[in-house]
Amino acid sequence: MTEAFIYDHVRTPRGRGREDGSLHEVTSVGLATQVLEAIRDRNELDTALLDDVILGSAQPVGEQGGVLARAAVLNAGYAQTVGGQQVNRFCASALDAVNLIAAQVMAGMIKGGIGGGVEAMSRTKLGYDSGPWAADPAITLSNHYAPQGIGADLIATLDGYTREDVDSYAIESQRRAAESWAEGRFGGAIVPVRDAIGEVLLDRDELIRPGTTLEQLAKLKPAFEGFGKAGFEAVVKDRYPQVEQLSYVHHGGNSSGIVDGSGVVLVGSEAFGKSAGLKPRAKIRSYASIGSEPTIMLTAPAAVTEKALSIAGMSKDDIDLFELNEAFASMMLRYMRTLDIPHDKINVNGGAIAMGHPMGATGAMILGTVLDELERRDLNTALVSLCAANGLGTATIIERV
Amino acid sequence: MRHLNILKGANGVATLVLDNADAPMNVISLDFTGEMEEAIASLTADESVKGVILSSAKPAFMAGADLKFLVGAYDQLTKRDHFEFSQRVSGMLRAIERSGKPWVAIIDGLALGGGLELALACHRRIAVDRPGTGVGLPEVNVGLLPGAGGTQRLLRIAGVKAALDLLLSGRQLGAKEALALKIIDEIVPADEAVSSAKAWLATNPDPVKPWDVKGAQAPQKLGILVPADAAHYSMAAAQVAKQAGYNQPAAAAILSTVYEGAQLPMDKALSVESKYFAQLLGSPVARNIIRTSFISRKAAEKGARRPAGVPKSKVSKVGVLGAGMMGAGIAYVSAKAGIEVVLLDRDVPTAEKGRQYSAKVTQKLIASGKMTEADAEAILARITATDDFAALEGCDMIVEAVFEDLAIKAETTAKAEAVIPESAVFGSNTSTLPISELAKASKRPDQFIGVHFFSPVDRMSLVEVIMGRQTSPETLAKALDFVAQLRKTPIVVNDSRGFYTSRVFQTMIHEGAAMLGEGVPPAVIENAAKAIGMPVGPLVLLDELSFDLPLMIVDQAIEQEGSKYLVPAGVQTLRRMRDEIGRGGRKAGGGFYEYLEGGKKQLWKGLSDHFPENDDWNIEDLKARFLYTQAIETVRCLEEGVLETKEDADLGSVYGWGFPLWTGGTISYIDTVGLPAFEREADRLAQLYGPRFSPPQSLRDRASKGTPFYAGAGQDETASEGRLASADS
């Protein structure tokens, strides 16, 4: 089997996903175009060597629909022979996009390509795409659909995480992210986003709040109690009858932030690297996807981690660093507890609670982040995973070369 | 035509008057449909007719469909038949809509269900401005959906959000709210309705509905591309889970009918609506709900169990002995029914306190606009609070509601009987003491009867009437006449420990306590009971009841029957809670729950120390145990003659202690499961959990003979005696 190598990765900074966010004026295709241009230019890449570009979006509708990847490829001035494909596995989309490029390389069907994603959440707002899982009543009832935040609060209820537990996790994420920025650890991957006259709109993650304290977070009202009381608590109890009362501990401060951004990863065979004159930085050891119980929704990462480890013939102790998307604090605590992973081996540079989660782009961003960190610490292996809506999850294991 | 009149007037205006020849209200029946089809065809073909006014000669426009016909359909017809029936009525209304002539409906009074669907098919709806005018689509309440275009027209007229609200709640709207939602177009004084309709017709209105305009792109065609609508479906489904639970298919079917129909052209949408209607009509749940809540209930209220040949009686003065919670409630409902009440207790202040309960209830009703000051005053004026037995003179009826103690009751009986007329009926509101035992204190045991009310009396509709060994048929007839005066629903049972309702209800709460003893986590127990549709869990109920009462009943039974008595499942848990742990229920300061400041409660954290939890539970088994223990105990009541009819069993369970209506009641539930399957499951549960689940012999006999309790279509030997109420009354 051909091996698939990571040659480079870039990402935009994450802009606040609201009307006052610095990236709000940039279209989704515009964000994707800028990262595609950047990864080409900094590698002096002859794009005719690329077979395919696969981009994920968790809401592939409106300006994020219509196989945005192809539009971005053409807009970035890539060779017109480069394909384009759109994938959606909700929040895991971009990691799946990278995995699909890697899989084609491994299968010998392509030599090289780019996987990643884009999500401009200030523009294609949450809810613009709904789908049967969340909005077709016949499906939502049989599926026991509840919003993700309810799933997060359910994990806290079942595992007994208190408000202080989840808030403390959030504060540590903020501290790590601030420290990483202060030390310039993200600098190598960041593509400043420019406007129509070429001026920089944003060159660092905008949402981050260094110095956040427990007292500040304690003042925030639980965000999902309204949903629960309106009916979703009944949905949850039908699946989890051991719940007497949901404990509502999540809020904006301990949940992933809503942001705009895009990230891509350049993947190819050894031969591709040679033709392009590039040195591989890591190889993809294995990847896996899985489905888990949809109502709690956010607990697939542990299972998909085991699955990816088993495919790679590795054990958890073979992994130097873990990177798991911080959708909500409770699912992070559950993951660490289930797999017995110490906090100092996971999300060592902070995560989406501090910096935000551009849904369909995050997988590529955190894969790049952990690769940079392996190099900085001179470690070898990392496992990246994300939970995704409706109980889905994806993981990828990389190893430096 | 028997149910319709067509009058042709000036300027091409025809009037079609709905006038059911067989009943005081217009209903959609097969008869009516046939005539209506004919009338629509002839009005459409008649070139001299330019427009049609549709009105009613009855006090209401139309009340809905003939439920008796619908409940019969379950066993007799296929889903294809249900679909075709719905499509026929739907097509009839579509013929009005597509007739090419404008139709105006004049809604004077109620237009409900099929009545509103008929009006919605017209091109204009004029409501008469009077308090009785209202519209609604209440089908969800009987386990159905509006199957004649109601879901589709409502969503196209009022929008998805408003349509779902009305369809899922089944609530009735006044004319003003209906106007705001465009369900009606105009509100006019009664004497202007016809002229207003004529004036509109004179403007030569375009008789094409917006959804029938060629090339029209209605907003609902975008479906869930409209984020607000997508979010609304999502929330509405959660609300269905909360309010209806997962046992009632009607609400879910309504959601799907709206969701799927919105994007379709009208005829296709109507066909989808008919398919979901057929799905519901072909499910046992709708049959169960209609049969118990409508047919059996109406029959009971009209005297299904009243002995024939006894002249109708009327109570004009009732003596209520004991002014506690029950007595006060009974006094209130009696006074409200226009009966003069003597409310007696040991001293006047205590009696007066009971009387003041009526003041409290009526004040609330006045505040919410449901009662006038004058009516409230009259009710209060009818109640005399006293401690003097002499005041009972002239009472035709006594309801004794003093402390549950044989001696106290005996003394009260003697004192009352010294004063009341010889013809008076003496009723006891006991819930635990044998009537025949109490009757021993009476000079006239044949006139002594149990009238068991439920708390709170003004809200609980059931009265369990209990025959003592010597109670005469005449006494029963009089007691039932009294219950009818109170507009309550009676069942009639024979004397035995706990009668019917208390005895079977007890099995449910004991089952919950037993589960706790087995190590099932308490939240799981409560959620399992709620998952089958019980309003609250058994542990809450036990706490409210306090453990003394169920334990006292058990102690008495052991004393009287010794080893013959099958000790209920939860006794050990209850004894441990009360006697060892010192938590005897809410009144004793806490039981399974702890009661926090501000009225909140939570499961007592210490429970798991005393009843260690395990993971061996299976939620489906727990749900089955709650349903089966009650159903099987009910069969025993029938076998022992405590119950005489299956209808009493079903009504008593649903209206006495909240056995879930989707089942139709404890006996209907067995038929719903099917006898062989029920017997198998009961045997399995008996093996796992004990002999309380063993199917009684009579159930095994039924299962082997294959004779369900209700012989097909809900029309059985009792129904064929013609005691069933017609659907429209």
Image: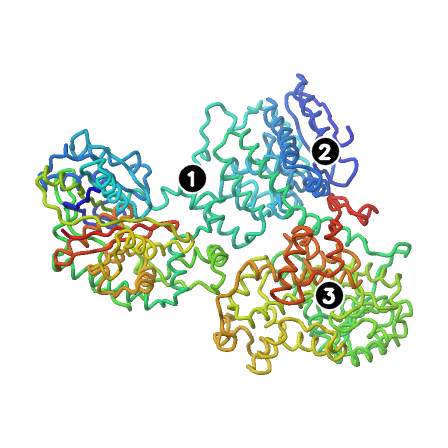
In screen coordinates, is B194 left or right of A297? right
Residue B30: image tag: 2
Q: Nearer the viewer, residue A306 or A51?
A: A306
Tell me the residue at 50%/52% (across/down). B239
Chain identifier of the residue bearing label 2 in the image: B
Q: Tell me the kind of residue under disc 1.
A: Ile
Q: Can residue B34 be seen in this view?
A: yes
Residue B144, image quadrant:
top right
How far apart marks 2 and 3 lie (CA) works out to 40 Å
Q: Count neighbours of disc 2 (C-alpha within 10 A) and say few if under 14, some if 14 to 19, many if 20 or more.
A: some
Residue B453 is labelled as: 3
Q: Which of B136 and A382 is in front in this view?
A: A382
Residues flagged by tags 2 and 3 on a common chain: yes
Q: Is mark 3 on a helix, strand or loop?
A: strand
Contact check, label 3 and label 1, Cβ < 8 Å: no
For discs 2 and 3, the disc positioned in front in the rendered view: 2
**If you read the primary sequence from the N terminus, does the residue marked by circle 3 or circle 1 appear first?**
1
Q: Residue at horizontal 48%, vertical 64%? A: A242
Report x, y in % for residue B434: 79, 72
Q: Tag 3: residue type?
A: Phe
Q: Compare residues B38 and B295 and report the one nearer the observer.
A: B295
